[in-house]
Image (spheres, coloured by chain):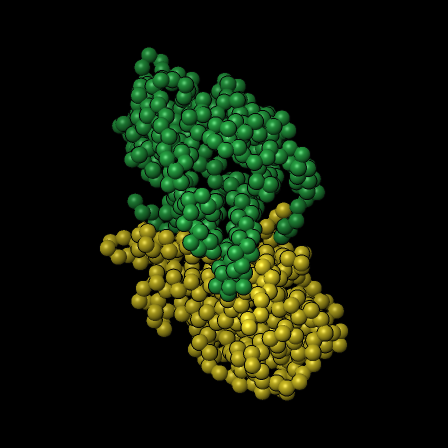
């Protein structure tokens, strides 16, 4: 057991810290479009410094960084509150899928523009009637004259209004069991048959969108991983989404803990024994989240693939982030009722944490079935 | 960065697991627990293997290994719920090794390391230590005062009053003693290592209680299917895993801090003890709920684990006390109450 960084890990972090000190893009400007442009510029900066596509192999223009380096990158970005790159879904999900399942032509066509942020990607998985039960999705793709014609509706589509490409899973065969009839497409968003409508959240912000797709066209060469293999391809992206996030989310919530302590000091409640107990409990859970994430990373490095244990940090993070924002708003007292309070925004936003990227209930199912070996529900 | 045991440490874990599984089959553990007795032969065997002195300096008869190795043994001892006086003796060893003067080490550590002249540690509250494991059979007792200072007394000079405890797998006494000899060194350095050790033991206890729940949930059928296929039961089991793994990460990290990064040990040890104290009880209680009525019977072994978990939560600082310590380390001392 050695929780210190190796000399090369240490120098990776030192270089990154120095680079961030000189290149931090500053606070995000207000307004959706301005904030997005800010992130886009930031991604290009990251790309030029060799920090975009950190986990991507060098042959595809990435850095080929180790898992520890990826985790350190996430920690450092959270530490200085750097914005996410604009094309985060392309970097974390789209690129890895194309690299794993794509043809040489597809790699040539898409990868570079994902890395630079020139082309933004979005994800069309969930539908109004297919949330946790993703494989039941109904959006239909029919082949006609060598191209695919797609009709259906998608929801929770982050950045759809900015995206050039959509990772779309659609049903191409109605007559086989639900997991077998799906195909993974890359759909061009720039066509009239795809309508994007913003979806306002309880924070009154349109972070997500709905997609209305009416006979959209997708050329056959945009099928990834073969017709009928969409479920397997989609699962790769979800595993990728969860694997790298543990350490970074732990770092983010550690910063939130410091802000919570500052708030307690400002409000003069640090002598209150109940508040002390609650802050300490959150501090403990934040630290254990970090430790679980690092322990999980060691397991991946030893055994190659991310295991289902990777489901623990996501669940733990949503629990602790919700508890943390609740305590902050408790400390604010009546001031927490104000709409312009940043903590109140975070309290409301945190309600999505246990839903987005896999609900806590689905994560518990995965842990029960695949880690503990309990009998399947269905 | 490698948050896992070395090959040597894995070997210690495997050996401990196998030996304890062979010596403490469930019926043997129960027989000892019901008699309120320890297995003296098994204790002798463990001592000969060097377990009792695993972290004690070689010059004082120990193995000269670290707290990580102690954590490994403690977890396995908890998993087997082994009725042996290991924890108490290890606590005394930690107190003397990390806070004792050279003379005190010279005098007491060899007996502790060989397991032949055992020690224990008690926490004084209002002049009395009210929950002292194995004080009736120890030769030396370390008493920690409310201000954190400690004294070492010969057991024969102390007033030791054994009492029947909820946890039948461990013997407890109340202890009063006048005088004694102050320990010279860093009391907190010792107390943090004791907290780390008992946290690791609770990890093993909770792991076993979780495994019992999962096994039962797979086998037990109601309404025509295994109860573990119902989410009300399976999600309870997933919650157990979350809490067991959190406790484990906390205890392993505290062990590593003790050996490699002592400046991080105070927070790490108190975090491990606070979390494992709550988690140990919750996991065992949740396991009892999964078992239903059979889990509430004396004939089922689960209650021995439940009682150990609760008693460990009370021993060497409660969750509330250790959380307050975490608060002190990050927010500072509270203002004195007028």
Q: Is residue A363 placed above or below B291 in the rendered structure? A: above
Q: Is residue B51 left or right of residue A95?
A: right
Could you say which quadrant of the image residue A220 lies in? top left
Q: If the image is split into quadrants, where does the C terminus of chain B sit?
A: bottom right
The picture quadrant where one finds residue A232 is top left
Tally the numbered discs.
Answer: 0
Chain letter, colour yellow: B
Judging depth in this view, the residue of A216 and B246 nearest the camera is A216
Image coordinates for residue A136, horizontal then vertical, percent: 30, 34
In depth, the one of A314 and A256 nearer the eye is A256
Above-or-below relation of B26 to A248: below
Q: Position of residue B132 (x, y in %)?
A: 55, 78
Q: Which chain is green?
A: A
Q: Residue at x 36, y 33 (%)?
A: A199
Residue visible at 48% across and 45% down in the picture: A342
Give left or right: position of B66 versus A312: right
**The furthest residue to the top:** A145
Residue B149 seen in render:
yes
Looking at this view, is A109 or B36 the one in front?
A109
- Is residue B7 depicted above or below A63 in this figure? below
Q: Position of residue B35 (x, y in %)?
A: 45, 80
Image height of B1 relative to B26, above or below: above
Residue B308, position as x, y percentages in the image: 47, 70
Residue at image location 49% in from the left, 61% down from the top: A275
Residue sitting at x 67%, y 62%: B65
* Residue B14 can be seen in this image: no
Q: Nearer the viewer, residue B292 or A23?
A: A23
């Amino acid at each position: 057991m050695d929780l210190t960084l190796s000399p090369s890990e240490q120098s990776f972090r030192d270089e990154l810290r120095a680079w961030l000190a000189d290149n931090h893009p500053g606070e995000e400007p207000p307004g959706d479009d301005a904030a997005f442009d800010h992130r886009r510029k930031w991604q290009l900066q990251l790309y030029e410094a060799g920090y975009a596509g950190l986990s991507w192999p060098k042959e595809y223009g990435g850095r080929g960084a180790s898992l520890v380096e990826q985790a350190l990158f996430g920690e450092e970005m959270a530490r200085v509150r750097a914005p996410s790159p604009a094309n985060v879904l392309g970097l974390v999900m789209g690129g890895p899928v194309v690299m794993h399942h794509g043809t040489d032509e597809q790699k040539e066509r898409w990868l570079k523009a994902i890395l630079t942020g020139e082309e933004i990607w979005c994800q069309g998985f969930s539908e109004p009637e297919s949330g946790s039960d993703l494989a039941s999705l109904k959006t239909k793709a029919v082949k006609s004259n060598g191209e695919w014609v797609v009709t259906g509706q998608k929801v929770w589509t982050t950045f759809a209004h900015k995206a050039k490409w959509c990772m779309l899973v659609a049903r191409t065969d109605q007559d086989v069991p639900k997991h077998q009839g799906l195909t993974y497409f890359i759909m061009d968003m720039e066509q009239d048959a795809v309508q994007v409508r913003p979806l306002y959240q309880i924070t009154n912000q349109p972070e997500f969108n709905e997609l209305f797709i009416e006979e959209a066209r997708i050329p056959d060469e945009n099928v990834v991983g073969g017709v009928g293999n969409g479920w397997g391809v989609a699962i790769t992206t979800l595993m990728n989404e969860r694997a790298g996030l543990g350490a970074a989310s732990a770092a983010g919530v550690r910063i939130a803990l410091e802000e919570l302590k500052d708030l307690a000091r400002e409000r003069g409640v640090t002598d209150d024994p109940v508040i002390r107990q609650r802050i300490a409990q959150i501090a403990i859970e934040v630290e254990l989240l970090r430790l679980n994430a690092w322990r999980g990373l060691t397991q991946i490095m030893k055994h190659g693939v991310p295991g289902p244990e990777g489901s623990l940090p996501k669940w733990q993070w949503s629990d602790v982030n919700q508890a943390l924002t609740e305590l902050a708003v408790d400390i604010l007292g009546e001031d927490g009722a104000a709409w312009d309070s940043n903590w109140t925004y975070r309290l409301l936003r945190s309600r999505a944490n246990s839903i987005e990227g896999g609900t806590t209930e689905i994560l518990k199912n995965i842990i029960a079935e695949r880690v503990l070996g309990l009998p399947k529900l269905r | 960065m490698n948050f896992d045991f070395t090959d040597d440490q894995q070997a210690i874990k495997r050996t401990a697991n196998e030996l304890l599984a062979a010596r403490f089959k469930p019926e043997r553990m129960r027989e000892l627990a019901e008699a309120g007795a320890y297995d003296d032969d098994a204790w002798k065997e463990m001592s000969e293997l060097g377990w009792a002195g695993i972290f004690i300096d070689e010059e004082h008869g120990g193995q000269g290994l670290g707290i990580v190795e102690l954590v490994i043994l403690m977890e396995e001892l908890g998993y087997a719920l082994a009725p042996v006086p290991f924890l108490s003796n290890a606590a005394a060893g930690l107190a003397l090794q990390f806070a004792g003067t050279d003379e005190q080490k010279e005098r007491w550590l060899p007996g502790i390391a060989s397991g032949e002249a055992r020690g224990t540690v008690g926490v004084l509250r209002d002049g009395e230590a009210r929950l002292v494991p194995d004080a009736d059979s120890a030769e030396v007792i370390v008493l920690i005062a409310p201000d954190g200072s400690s004294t070492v007394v010969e057991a024969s000079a102390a007033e030791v009053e054994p009492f029947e405890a909820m946890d039948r797998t461990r013997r407890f006494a109340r202890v009063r003693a006048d005088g004694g000899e102050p320990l010279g060194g860093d009391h907190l350095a010792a107390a943090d290592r004791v907290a780390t050790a008992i946290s690791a033991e609770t990890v093993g206890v909770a792991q076993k209680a979780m495994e019992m729940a999962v096994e039962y949930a797979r086998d037990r059928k109601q309404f025509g299917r295994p109860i573990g296929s119902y989410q009300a039961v399976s999600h309870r089991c997933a919650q157990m895993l979350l809490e067991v793994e959190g406790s484990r990460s906390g205890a392993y990290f505290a062990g590593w801090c003790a050996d490699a990064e002592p400046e991080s040990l105070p927070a790490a040890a108190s975090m491990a003890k606070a979390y494992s104290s709550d988690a140990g009880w919750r996991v065992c209680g949740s396991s009892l709920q999964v078992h239903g009525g059979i889990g509430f019977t004396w004939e089922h072994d689960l209650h021995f684990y439940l009682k150990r978990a609760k008693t460990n939560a009370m021993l060497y600082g409660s969750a509330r006390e250790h959380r307050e310590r975490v608060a002190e380390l990050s927010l500072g001392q509270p203002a004195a109450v007028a």
